[in-house]
Image (cartoon, rainbow, N blue to C red):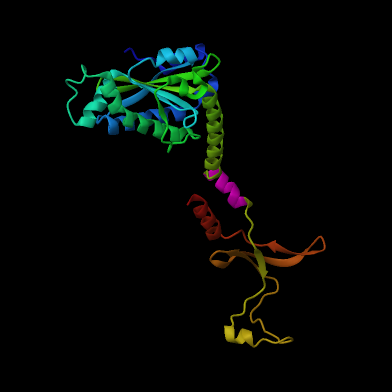
Amino acid sequence: MIPVSAVLRKKIEMATGIPPTLLQIRTFWSGMCDLVAAWAGEALGAECGASIAERKVVGGKGVKISVDSPYAFYFSAEASPGLCAIKLDQDIAVRNAAARLQQDTDGFDAGSGLFLKLLAEQSVLSLWQKLAEELGGHDVYSGFVMQQDASAVAGALGEDARYMRVDVDLDFDGKVSRISFVFLLDFLMRFAREYMEREVRRKAEVHSASPKSLNESVRASSIELDGVLGRLPMSVGDCALLEVGQILPLAGVDPGRLLLSAGTLKGSVDIGSGELGVWKKHRALKMHTPVSESFVRELIDFKSA
């Protein structure tokens, strides 16, 4: 197969009527490829790379044509309102059978299609469950998910129903196999809008924890400042004996020198000094020294932590 560039693929998809909203949820599509690759490693016993080969909007008739294969699996509308069908190609069905029976793939190509499909049912159901959990709204524990009748899927493959087929290529050391998924378009559109809203909220939460926002938060936070004329050390026992009217001498206090003290998690810290005065009829402290460099450094270290 000739690889198609991402830009060319996007132009093709836009021309085939795929809603832009579905093209914007790139992280979902890349996550889906990772999920399929991980599933292949478990179910097929082979490591591979997974990439989206094609996405196409089709009607009910188009779905019937797209999944016309011995290895197509349909899911009930009640249990699976979004993911309607999964189709394997023969190579994947053979690899699954060989892995299940712990044999080489040689000799399975001529085997019965029904036999290969029966062996693939459990693996496909596991893949459906993994992807259904990502989509939400699916009953991943339902015992009546897989159906034989294609019309049992959401939308019943009616003329008015719209679907999107997503083809994913699995690259096994240069040999490419394909697995196809069919989604109900209306469900996928609702999912895409909700997915984008969640991404916006997630990015907002990440932004709120960025250094810039943390800096703004620290700057906007409040701190208690005290003007301290003097301090008197005293035992807890002496404090218990204090009485109304008792005089406590403050030795060595300079009335013209007032300390500015900040309340921190480590206790009260002196961050500067000044003198007591009056400003606009209010008691005020006029600073004589800049704020302590060690105090500013601690703030910077906290912001950077």
Q: Main secondary structure of the magenta part?
A: helix
Which residue is pictured at 70% across the width and 86% down the height? Answer: 247
Q: As rendered, which of 195 and 101 lies closer to the eye?
A: 101
Q: Is residue 231 left or right of residue 184?
A: right
- In the displayed structure, would residue 85 be above or below residue 280? above
Q: As rendered, which of 39 and 9 lies closer to the eye?
A: 39
x and y, in percent, of residue 110 in the image: 20, 16
x and y, in percent, of residue 200 in the image: 56, 35
The reply to whether the magenta stretch includes residue 209 is: no
Which residue is pictured at 60% across the width and 47% down the height? Answer: 216
Q: Is residue 88 left or right of residue 139?
A: left
Q: Is residue 194 left or right of residue 46?
A: right
Q: As rendered, which of 277 and 20 lies closer to the eye?
A: 20
x and y, in percent, of residue 274 in the image: 67, 65
Q: Which residues are magenta?
A: 211-219
For the N terminus, the image quarter is top left
Residue 86 in view: yes
Q: Is residue 283 left or right of residue 235?
A: right
Which residue is pictured at 27% across the width and 28% down the height? Answer: 119
Residue 172 in view: no
- In the displayed structure, would residue 248 be above or below residue 286? below
Q: As rendered, which of 34 and 148 lies closer to the eye?
A: 148
Which residue is pictured at 46% across the width and 30% down the height? Answer: 28
x and y, in percent, of residue 123 in the image: 32, 31
